[in-house]
Image (tube, helix red, strand yellow):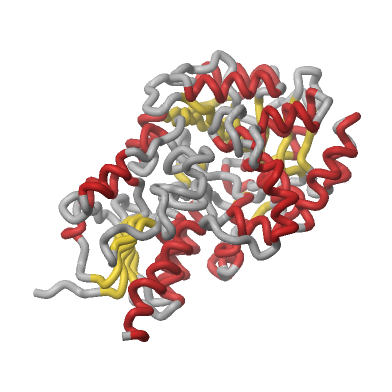
Amino acid sequence: MARQSYDAVVVGSGPNGLAAAITLARAGKTVAVFEARATPGGGMRTAELTLPGFQHDICSAIHPLGIGSPFMRSLPLERFGVEWIFPPAALAHPLDDATAVTLERSVAATAAQLGRDAGRYRRLFGPLARQWQPIAQFTLGPLGLPRRPLALARFGLPALAPADLLARTLFREERTRGFFAGMAAHSMLPLSQPASAAFGLVLGLFGHALGWPLPRGGSQRLADALVAYLRELGGTVVTDAPITALDDLPPARAILCDVTPRQLIAIAARHLPQGYQQRLAHFHYGPGVCKVDFALDGPIPWHAAACARAGTVHLGWSLDEIATSERAAWQGEHAARPFVLLAQQSLFDPTRAPAGRQTAWAYCHVPNGSTVDMTGRIEAQIERFAPGFGARILARHTMTALDMQAYNPNYIGGDINGGAQDVTQLFTRPTAQLDPYATPLHNLFLCSSSTPPGGGVHGMCGYHAARSVLRKVFHADRTS
């Protein structure tokens, strides 16, 4: 019996695979998505990892790029159950003197905490926050000519700098330098690398312009909404369907793969030219993460009360400490005092834990492929800023970098960004070519975070890949 054929098939149901499918379905194409696991979502999954009733986000948790993504903002997500929760402060950065700097929606309110740097902070972030939309359009897409070059110039010049150099040059207060370094460290790059400042600028301006929200009920709600919308458009999602070769797929005019270059080689080795495979093999992956989820008997007892207003907390107070931690991961070392990124979703979303209980989500960066359990060092960093934290722990669940890869094969060596996002691979991922989503096969495309703009729950890699498919595969019908 002949298998059903489609206009397009997508391998992988992460945010980019679903975004690609939705973009094609909106254009009237028949689409099917094939997901290896029992539930769709990729990095957008939520589960009871510790104790019954405690809902933990397995990977993505806080979504500044989700709320700021042009693609995500075009979707009727609320109609499918997505409710964004905005903590009073997007971010808290506690210091060793029992105070904290918070990222407020107001640039002025944030700057007021920064002493001698208040004016400099306002002059940097005020114009960027007002121009967030053209900046988002430019940074969340492939390399191209900006529509608003003057707005982009104000962003682009400091963005190209190493984060540590920009922080030391622009700011005089250690609290300001550490605060900016924590945002830049989301890049998973050494802060001495060019363009590492871009990540701090983007996250800061999104915090001021939009906030850093979390979806009520967990990141799985976002995945469920994308799947429901795709099905409303006529698309199909097939779970428990691992794809090990292109021949496993039903007939289709276009194939889009939400996978990394290493996996694409494995899936399409019989079809891809050897030269292109060699270029893909040179794609390099960044550090991994070690992640711990906690079930707690109450809120984290922060020394700085301001931390209880924030959905995200950065632990590692100074620029030097954070830079040392991030450099260690690239040098194959495990920091004694790792920079820890922590989310406390249940403080603002009571559906995440039983009444009176709380959850915490925390990770640090480690060398790619690490099997080292960093639970003790992560807990020590939390205890440093929240004395008595250890006594609140009811249960914990740890995933090393290789555990993360076992959970999601796209996380090569625990790299949740789909490859290093350094200056050489920021826009030229996975290889340097005019269309980063296309391959030498006319109907095979890559739509994962290994393409521009890289990691994060924004769907823009899938959106741009689907636009490439519409131009290159389906436009041919209208011109032939």
Residue name at image x 70 percent, y 29 percent: 165
Q: Give the quarter of the figure containing the N terminus.
A: bottom left
Q: Position of residue 446 (x, y in %)?
A: 36, 56
Residue name at image x 34 percent, y 71 percent: 31
**405 sits to left or right of 120:** left
**397 sits to left or right of 77:** left
Question: Closer to the camera, 351 or 159?
Answer: 159
In which quadrant of the rendered view does residue 109 lie?
A: top right
Q: Position of residue 190 (x, y in %)?
A: 56, 28
Q: Is residue 191 above or below residue 273?
A: above
Count of numbered labels shown in the rendering: 0
Examine the rendering and report whether any part of residue 347 can be seen: no
In which quadrant of the rendered view does residue 119 lie?
A: top right
**269 sits to left or right of 281:** left
Q: Give the quarter of the figure containing the C terminus.
A: bottom left
Question: Closer to the camera, 102 or 154?
Answer: 154
Q: Position of residue 449 (x, y in %)?
A: 44, 49
**329 sits to left or right of 273:** right
Residue name at image x 31 percent, y 70 percent: 8
Examine the rendering and report whether any part of residue 419 can be seen: yes
Q: Position of residue 93 (x, y in %)?
A: 73, 30
Question: Closer to the camera, 94 or 207?
Answer: 207
Q: Is residue 117 above or below residue 376?
A: below
Q: Is residue 66 above or below residue 322?
A: below
Residue name at image x 72 percent, y 54 percent: 210
In which quadrant of the rendered view does residue 447 lie?
A: bottom left
Residue located farthest toward the top when viewing the structure as drawn: 336
Question: Closer to the camera, 311 or 209?
Answer: 209
